[in-house]
């Protein structure tokens, strides 16, 4: 069994009302040492995916849990239209990986404590997930909350990694700021790519800037090394010499939603192998 890693990724914004005042910022890190332990476990247990990206497609059920403090838009209400548009964003983003997403169920819960204070390793998160989570390791649970108080104040989202499921199945899933869905108020993070990014972690990807310009990196050979997160859409940025321009358009960077548009073939290969190994999803 691998050690308990920091398998909840968090990136945040400063506004408690859902309107970002700074770029995405990481609130939780996986160290190079923890990453190396995870990668050693992955190498020892790796299940290879089918040959070719389009060898086999798979559909993942999405259980979408809207948690709010009241029924108002500012209080956390997310409409059915926004949820359906979010699913479309995910399908467009992950089509190259052979993964499609289908909405299996929507729950709506009014709970001000969960809405305001749910964040990694809190009693509010545990209670919320224990109450609402559905499905198995193959199914994605998404929770929308407000991140307005406590240790999670100002966060934009966080997720668990695939290898966490075997020891903490009830914790599995993604939690995002309600106003980051398409049509929300968290511009420039309101086109739905907060969830695209977080699902990348749920599928086994690290940040493109993991490890900076060092040798560890994000365990994907074709993502150029990046010294630090990219904010906005800084075209032509090259923060590490010799590796090519920074992958500012990658879903696993911190760029604005409008700047994000791709995963690399290496990331897709990793996703397919990660979920075959840890989620029982074969492509």
Image (cartoon, rainbow, N blue to C red):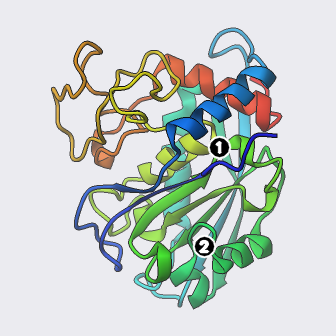
Residue 224 lies, with reference to residue 187, above or below; the image says above
Residue at 78%, 22% (x, y): give it. Answer: 44
Residue 217 lies, with reference to residue 115, above or below; the image says above
Frontmost residue, 100 versus 215:
215
Looking at the rendering, in which quadrant would you find the N terminus?
Answer: top right
Residue 144 lies, with reference to residue 265, above or below; the image says below
Marks 1/2: CA distance? 18 Å
Where does the image place residue 141, in percent across and percent down from the top left?
Answer: 69, 58
Work out whether mark 1 precedes mark 2 in sequence or the reverse, and give the earlier one: 2
Q: In this view, does 257 lie to the left or right of 281?
A: left
Residue 146 visible in image: no
Q: Callout 2: few (<14), some (14-19), or many (20+) C-alpha neighbours within 10 Å? A: many
Looking at the rendering, in which quadrant would you find the C terminus?
Answer: top right
**Could you say whether the residue bearing mark 2 is in a helix, strand or loop?**
strand
Where does the image place residue 189, in percent across and percent down from the top left?
Answer: 33, 57
Q: In this view, does 220 lie to the left or right of 131?
A: left
Where does the image place residue 12, in percent across and percent down from the top left?
Answer: 38, 62
The residue indicated by pointer 1 is: 101
Q: Callout 1: few (<14), some (14-19), or many (20+) C-alpha neighbours within 10 Å? A: many
Residue 147 lies, with reference to residue 91, above or below; the image says below
The residue indicated by pointer 2 is: 66
Residue at 21%, 40% (x, y): give it. Answer: 233
Residue at 46%, 22% (x, y): give it. Answer: 264
Where does the image place residue 214, in percent across and percent down from the top left?
Answer: 38, 25
């Amino acid at each position: 069994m691998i050690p308990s890693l920091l398998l909840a990724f968090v990136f945040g914004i400063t506004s408690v009302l859902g309107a970002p005042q700074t770029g995405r910022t990481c609130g939780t890190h996986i160290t190079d040492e923890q990453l190396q332990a995870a990668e050693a476990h992955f190498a020892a247990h790796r299940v290879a995916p089918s040959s070719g990206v389009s060898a086999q497609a798979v559909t993942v059920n999405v259980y979408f849990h809207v948690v709010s403090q009241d029924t108002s838009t500012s209080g956390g209400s997310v409409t059915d239209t926004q949820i359906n548009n979010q699913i479309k964003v995910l399908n467009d983003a992950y089509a190259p990986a052979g993964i499609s997403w289908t909405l299996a169920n929507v729950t709506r819960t009014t709970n001000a404590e969960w809405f305001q204070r749910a964040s990694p390793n809190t009693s509010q998160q545990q209670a919320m997930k224990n109450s609402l989570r559905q499905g198995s390791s193959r199914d994605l649970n998404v929770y929308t909350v407000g991140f307005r108080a406590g240790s999670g104040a100002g966060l934009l989202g966080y997720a668990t990694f695939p290898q966490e499921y075997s020891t903490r199945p009830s914790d599995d899933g993604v939690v995002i700021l309600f106003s980051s869905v398409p049509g929300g108020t968290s511009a420039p993070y309101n086109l739905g790519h907060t969830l695209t990014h977080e699902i990348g972690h749920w599928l086994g990807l690290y940040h493109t800037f993991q490890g900076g310009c060092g040798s560890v990196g994000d365990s994907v050979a074709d993502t150029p090394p990046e010294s630090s997160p990219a904010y906005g859409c800084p075209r032509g940025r090259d923060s590490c010499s010799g590796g090519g321009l920074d992958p500012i358009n990658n879903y696993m960077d911190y760029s604005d939603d409008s700047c994000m548009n791709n995963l690399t073939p290496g990331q897709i290969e990793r996703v397919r192998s990660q979920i075959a190994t840890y989620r029982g999803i074969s492509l």
